[in-house]
Structures are given as structure tokens and as C-alpha cells.
Amino acid sequence: MAEPAPFRCLSSKFQSLRFNDEGFATDTSNEQKLVEESVSKCYKVFKSSHSFYPDVPLLDRELHTEFLLRGIKHLSASYECLDSSRPWLCYWILHSLELLEVPIPEDHALSIATFLGKCQDPCGGFGGGPMQYPHLAPTYAAVNALCILANITEKVFDVLDREKLYSFLMRMRTPDGAFKMHDGGEVDIRGVYCALSVARLTNIMTKELVDGTIDFIVRCQTYEGGFAGYPGLEAHGGYTFCGVASLVLLGHTERCDLRSLLRWVANRQTQFEGGFQGRTNKLVDGCYSFWQGACFPIIHMIMCTDDDDQNLSASSWMFNQEALQEYILVCCQHDYGGLLDKPGKSRDHYHTCYCLSGLSVAQHFVGGSLQNDLVIGNASNKLRPIQPVYNLSLDSVMMAQKHFGSMKLSEKGPIS
Ligand SMILES: CC(C)=CCC/C(C)=C/CC/C(C)=C/COP(=O)(O)OP(=O)(O)O
Ligand SMILES: [Zn+2]
């Protein structure tokens, strides 16, 4: 096992801030200044303990696990606003637990799968809760959650109606190859990614399902290099992940302007804080550790297969992996467990899932047959690696491939 890397502790973190009072202050620069002050405070507190405990920062596995296990059983009334995101809560919690390698008892797995079954619409797809209209986002979350649970028992896949899922996806298709999120709902690149991800995992991809989809995705890449939710809008990390992952799922990454994407995403890592921002001139946020961070292994994988890119690193992704780990470990852990957006924000399961997913990307480099782990702080910080396109463990993706790989749709055969 590789030795944990020493804490980098950039000296700049303890120097004066980049802003001065005579500068041209805007709302944006004022907000940025406040974030830098709070991040700087976190690093100072951390540095004072660092001399006593050299193997810090520590990922507080126990507290995060407690927070997650409590949430899978019971959520307080303050979670009412997430009543239409219940399959998401299952996925965020289960994926965080799989990253932390916390076992889930079989009876829990079966009761979560039964609950997800209750969210499934009689005409296919999953809603945000029982009796709710089917929607592509909770459908993606439910399918991913089932793939994780299938590691415990494959019986969980019995709840999924593939034929009806296919007809739901076909109903969400628009004539130009995009997908609406639900009947009468908005059309954007999230719909494309959710549809393609579940279609691939459950092996129901057909030519008819994705006719015109590549062109829609390509139209979402903006002049900045990242992808927007819809052609003509602003590039954003969440949509950029959806765009580039969708091109991988369709096997048409050659349609992406990879150089401009790489330049845009690399510039979204904030110099001072070490984490990622979602878009140009906006604030750092722990969840972009995944949405932006996961683009790097995907870009690397695409470039690896491209003969022109002989200079590609064989040991690290093209972002500062140490700085991202420091931001997550020092600034995004809540004192009572769970992770968060930035210092001062409250913890939640969404940020716990995506901070941990980003931390995993930053810890593990895999380039073809070459592997290089770079774990900041205590050796126990090491998480399981992820398959970045689905944001699942490699085992969970394999469970789906093993289970659905040989199944056919009754009318249309799957495409490769
Ligand atoms: C699979 C799936 C459903 C993916 C979702 C991807 C995702 C996170 C999209 C984000 C959308 C967006 C424009 C957020 C801006 O929020 P903001 O203005 O509050 O944040 P910002 O200031 O950081 O941009
Ligand atoms: Zn966030």
C-alpha cells in the first residue's frame, strides 16, 4: 500500500488575501472574499492541530457512517422538502456507504428495494416517492441504488420492469433526440444523461432511443469549453459531467472538443480554496469535486485512446489532486458527521455523496493498466475507487452488467 502523502499546506493559504479594500468590489468579489476568509480560517485551525497530529487531515469515517446509517432509517420533518427526491436519498446514502466500505445488512437491502419498487410507475420509470409521477432524475437514482444493493442480493433487481422502463424512456424522447425530465417537463442534458445511464446499465439501449441524441449533446458544448444544460446557455459543471459522460455512453467522444473542455474544467479548480467552482467566477462548492472532478478521468480515458496524446501523464489526473483532497477534508467535513458545500453551510446527504465521490477520484489515478494512489492525510482516508461515468463502484456496475447483460427486450434487440 502506498504511503499517505504529506499535507501540502500551501503557504499562500496563510498570506494576505488576493483582494484589497481599494479594489473594484462587486457582489461577486465580496462573496469570494468572504469564502476565502472562511477557508483560510479552516486551514489555520487545521494547521494548529497539524503539528501535534502529523497524519491529519483525517476523514471521520465513523461520524459520516453514523450520519448516513441514521438517514437511511429515519429522516426528520425538516427533510419534507425532499419528499420528491426519495430515490435520490437512497442513492446518495448507499453510494456514500459503498465508498466508505460499510456493509449493508440483507434485510435493509430488501426493504430499500421494496420501497424503490413502490416508487415505480405502473407505466415505467420511477417517481420521487410512492404514487408520484415518473421522472428521469429519480429513475436514474433508483437504478443506481438497485445496482449498489445488488451486491448484497441480486433479488433486488426483480423490482425493476425493464420493458416498461424502455417505454418510459421512449416517451421522454423529444423529436431532436433530447429527453424531457417528465411528461410535460423541461428538456435538458440531465435528461439525456439519466436516460442513457439507465439504458446502458439495464441493457435496453436501442438505435431508436438515441436517434439524434449525439447532435443535441454536441450543441450543448459552449464557446467556453464546458457544457450547458441546453444549447445557447451557460457552461456549468453539473451539465458538463452529463455531456461528456453521455458521449462516453454513446461511444462518440470524438464529437467533443476535448481540448477546450479540458481547458475549461481545469480552470474551474479554485487556486486559493483547492476545490472546484461550478462555473466561471462563481464560488467553490464541495459537490463540484465530483461533477467537475469526474470529468478528468473521463477526459484521460478518451485521450489515452487518442494517438496524438503521447504526453499524457501516467501517474496523475490533470488537476491538483492534493489541493482538492485538502479542501474536502479540511473545509467540508461537518463536526457531527456528513459533508458540505463550504465552511458555514449545513451538511446534507447530497453533498456527503458528491464530496466523497470527488475525494475518491482525487485519491485514485487509473490510466490504462497503470494505477497510482495519492491519499492525503491518514492512510485510513482511502475510499473505494469509482467508475466515473455512472458514479458507482466498479462492483456495482459489474453487478448490472452481469445481471442484465444477456437479457433482451421483447421487440427490439439492444445495440452495442
Ligand atoms: C444527473 C443529474 C441530475 C445531474 C445534475 C447536475 C447538476 C448538479 C446541475 C447543476 C445545475 C445548476 C445550473 C446549478 C446552479 O446552481 P447555483 O447557481 O445555485 O450554483 P453555482 O453558483 O455553483 O453555479
Ligand atoms: Zn453543492
Image (spheres, rainbow, N blue to C red):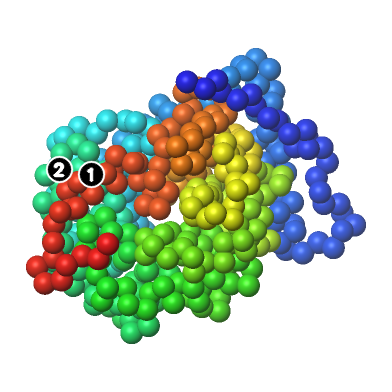
Q: From the viewer's side, name the closer residue of 372 and 134.
A: 372
Label ID, residue 225: none
SS of the residue under disc 1: helix
- The image quadrant that residue 319 belongs to is top right
Q: Looking at the image, which residue sits at the far right?
A: 22
Q: Residue furthest bottom?
A: 175
| Point 37% across, 69% down: residue | 192
Q: Residue furthest front?
A: 307
- The residue tagged 1 is 399
Q: Quadrant of the C terminus?
A: bottom left
Residue type of the residue flagged with mark 1: Met
Q: Residue at x 52, y 55 (%)?
A: 306
**Residue depth check, mark 1 versus mark 2: number of the one nearer the observer:** 1
Asked whether 182 or 130 is in front, the reply is 182
Visible residue check, residue 310? yes
Q: Position of residue 15 (x, y in %)?
A: 82, 37
Is residue 388 found left or right of 7 in the rendered image? left
Sequence order check, earlier mark of 1 and 2:
2
Q: Position of residue 158 (x, y in %)?
A: 11, 51
Q: Which percent across, then down, holds residue 11? A: 78, 33
Residue type at mark 2?
Glu
Q: Is residue 42 above or below residue 83?
A: above
Does the residue at mark 1 contact the one at mark 2 (Cβ under 8 Å)? yes
Q: Tell me if residue 209 comes above or below residue 323 in the rendering.
A: below
Q: Position of 261 compared to 248: left or right?
A: right
Could you tell me which secondary element the residue under label 2 belongs to?
Answer: helix
**Residue at left offset 46%, top offset 42%:** 368
Q: Circle 1: is it few (<14), some (14-19), or many (20+) Cα within 10 Å?
A: many
Some atom of ligand 1 lies within 8 Å of the CB belonging to the residue at label 1: no
Give the residue at mark 2.
Answer: 154
Question: Few, some or many C-alpha atoms within 10 Å of disc 2 (few <14, some 14-19, many ≥20)?
Answer: some
* Residue lying at 37% horizontally and 78% vertically, measured from the top left: 212
